[in-house]
Image (tube, helix red, strand yellow):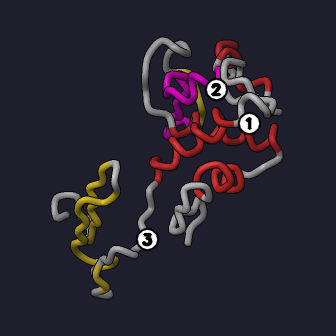
């Protein structure tokens, strides 16, 4: 916690039968001295990506979305100017192999490598895939993931929106 300047953490070890060990350390905010508890909400950030991936793959047979088709087919505006960007499929975004990157200094999206040729984490890729699915299905990410993952698994403390 000191090394990464994190005021508090909650740790859970889980097996197929449920929690094996749970511990909480530190504070929600060092300035107010509120200790972390097993009911404290945490931001999970990229841990939501598997929920989204499961949800869109779960419905691919009954909804009009083909992960092997170029995502550009589902979006109204191009997301990279290179012609190769039109070959990026949902599968490439889901497997972080789209090649899509963002230059902070130039403020633009670009292809760092040919789609499908290597792996590089891309939160941007998931954001574009989310936009495509939301436009196509006329349903928000929140609604889709709640119906498919969160509600069926009774994940009562989970949200895709800030608390």
Q: In the rendered image of this protein, does residue 109 appear above or below residue 148?
A: above
Mark 1, residues whose alpha carbon is within 10 Å: few (<14), some, or many (≥20)? many
Comes first in the chain, label 1 or label 2: 2
Q: Residue at x 63, y 41 (%)?
A: 55
Hey, which quadrant is residue 70 in on the image? top right
Magenta segment, which residues?
A: 89-107
Q: Which residue is mark 2?
A: 90
Which part of the image, by quadrant, shows the N terminus? Answer: bottom left
Comes first in the chain, label 2 or label 3: 3
Which part of the image, by quadrant, shows the C terminus? Answer: bottom right
- The residue furthest front is 17
Q: Residue at x 27, y 66 (%)?
A: 9
Disc 3 versus disc 1: distance between alpha carbons? 29 Å
Instruction: Left or right? Give the position of 59 relative to 8.
Output: right
Q: Nearer the viewer, residue 106 or 158?
A: 158
Q: Do callouts 1 and 2 mark residues in contact (Cβ within 8 Å)?
A: yes
């Amino acid at each position: 916690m000191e090394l990464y300047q994190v005021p508090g953490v909650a740790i859970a070890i889980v097996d197929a039968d449920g929690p094996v060990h749970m511990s909480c350390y530190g504070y929600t905010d060092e300035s107010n001295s509120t200790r972390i508890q097993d009911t404290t909400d945490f931001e999970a950030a990229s841990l939501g990506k598997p929920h989204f991936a499961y949800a869109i793959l779960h419905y691919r047979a009954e909804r009009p979305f083909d992960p092997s088709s170029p995502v550009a087919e589902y979006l109204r505006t191009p997301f990279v100017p290179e012609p190769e960007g039109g070959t990026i499929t949902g599968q490439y975004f889901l497997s972080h192999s789209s090649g899509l990157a963002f230059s902070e200094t130039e403020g633009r999206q670009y292809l760092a490598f040919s789609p499908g040729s290597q792996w590089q984490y891309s939160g941007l890729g998931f954001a574009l895939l989310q936009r495509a699915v939301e436009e196509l299905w006329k349903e928000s990410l929140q609604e889709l993931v709640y119906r498919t993952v969160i509600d069926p698994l009774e994940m009562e403390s989970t949200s895709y929106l800030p608390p």
